Image (cartoon, grey):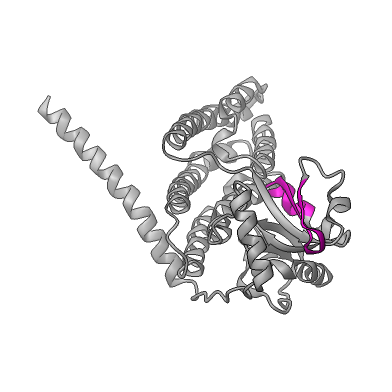
Amino acid sequence: MLKWIRRLLATLLTIVVILVAIPLAGLGYGYLTTAPVAVSPSAPADDGAAQIAARLAAEIDGYKRPEESTFLTYPEWAIVYAAREYAGLVENASPRTFPYWAYIGRFWQDYALMIRATADYGFNFQNHLMLMVIGISHTVEHAVQWSYENTIGWLTEFAVMFQPVPEDKYQARVAAEYAAFLDQVPWYRFPYAEKRAGLWDTEPATGLAAIRSWERKLGFGLAYSIKQGYADLIKSGLDATSEAALLDIHVWAEGPVAAAIAGEPDTELEQDLGADGAVFVTKRYQVFTDMIPRLIQRGVRFVEIGGNRLIFLTVTASEAIDAPDRTQTVFDYALPADRATRRIGLIVPVGELHTVLPALAQAGAVLEHVYDY
């Protein structure tokens, strides 16, 4: 019995050491391979605007969000982009060819950059806790999948002369569904168990190709089971230790706000401020990002988003672009899975979105996401 207890303790100690070593090594790599970020603060509001902002923050629950969250939200979305770019690759190529290690490194670089960007803000424990958890998960998952695809996966691909089987096509569809799911819903709410059942219900290939079919069923069926268990654990932990995520964002804007938001789903006017504009509430995440250019086209000018006057956003482009005036470039890199596409991260004053976004579009950039705290 004592021997088994020692083995159990040794195993637990090994797991703890690994869990501590991953973020230490990841952030060490991130800091060594990125440059310092000095965030230029937004211009202070005049006395009248400051009084309105203070009143709105006092009267509207959830109006004011921590400004540092615009930066610390980005690494969470880097996980979304990795899933999206994986789905894009496996639609036409083997999952073995995905640059898993490049995406591991990219996450820790992005996290290090955002730590640098928030150095002058207070420490946001909840944001950092989530980033540590998903960073470790992302690292382990990608390292394990790289190892698996380049050993067992390679052998079964070789057995079928590198032709996809029905299970490969099913997995590609699930990858696309997962990437789309993450636009609005956290990863741990994805129905992994349901997708495992779908994988097992897929009619396997016949003949020698059945080797690949059953390898996919067994290997990824187990992966779905592990992910479902881990997702349930994360959900339980967050329910016990964290407040529910705020799903709405409050926006102060000027111009024809009421007319501009008419017809936008899940969006309503909260306060008419007369000559100072209006406040409206809408859903966060990708739906809000997609809405912003439409509102700008309708004449809206933003004053505060989430009670803040500085925001982080990313765009994609086929080549490097000149950052518009009054913006600050944090990073500009080619996507590991698609070297012909670049991702560019910019800090933008909220009050300049109506000029910055059209300028970026004119330069050939596509708005990817506005990180709404």
Name the quarter where the N terminus is drawn. top left
The answer to which of 271 and 17 lies nearer the viewer is: 271
Query: Measured along the vertical axis of the image, is residue 201 above or below residue 46?
Result: above
Residue 209 at what x, y percent from top left? 63, 30
Position of residue 142 in the picture relative to residue 209 (left or right): left
Asked if the stretch drawn in magenta spans residue 287, the answer is yes
Does residue 310 lie above or below 170 as drawn? Answer: below
Q: Nearer the viewer, residue 98 or 82?
A: 82
Comparing 302 with 143, the one in front is 302
- The correct choice, above or below, for 88 with respect to 256 in the image is above
Q: Residue at x 71, y 55 (%)?
A: 251
Q: Nearer the viewer, residue 116 or 179?
A: 116
User: At which x and y percent is residue 179?
Assistant: 66, 43
- Position of 95 with respect to 20 (left or right) is right
Q: Position of residue 106 (x, y in %)?
A: 53, 60
- Residue drawn where x is 58% and y is 74% of the image: 41
Label total for image = 0
Q: Tell which residue pokes out farthest to the left in this image.
A: 2
Region in magenta: 269-291
Instruction: Please state, as top left, top right, bottom left or bottom right, where the C terminus lies in the image.
Output: bottom right
At 69% from the left and 37% from the top, the residue drawn is 177
Q: Position of residue 238 (x, y in %)?
A: 46, 37
In this rendering, does residue 372 appear at all?
Answer: no
Q: Is residue 115 left or right of residue 205?
A: left
Residue 3: tell me if it is visible. yes
Q: Is residue 195 magenta?
A: no
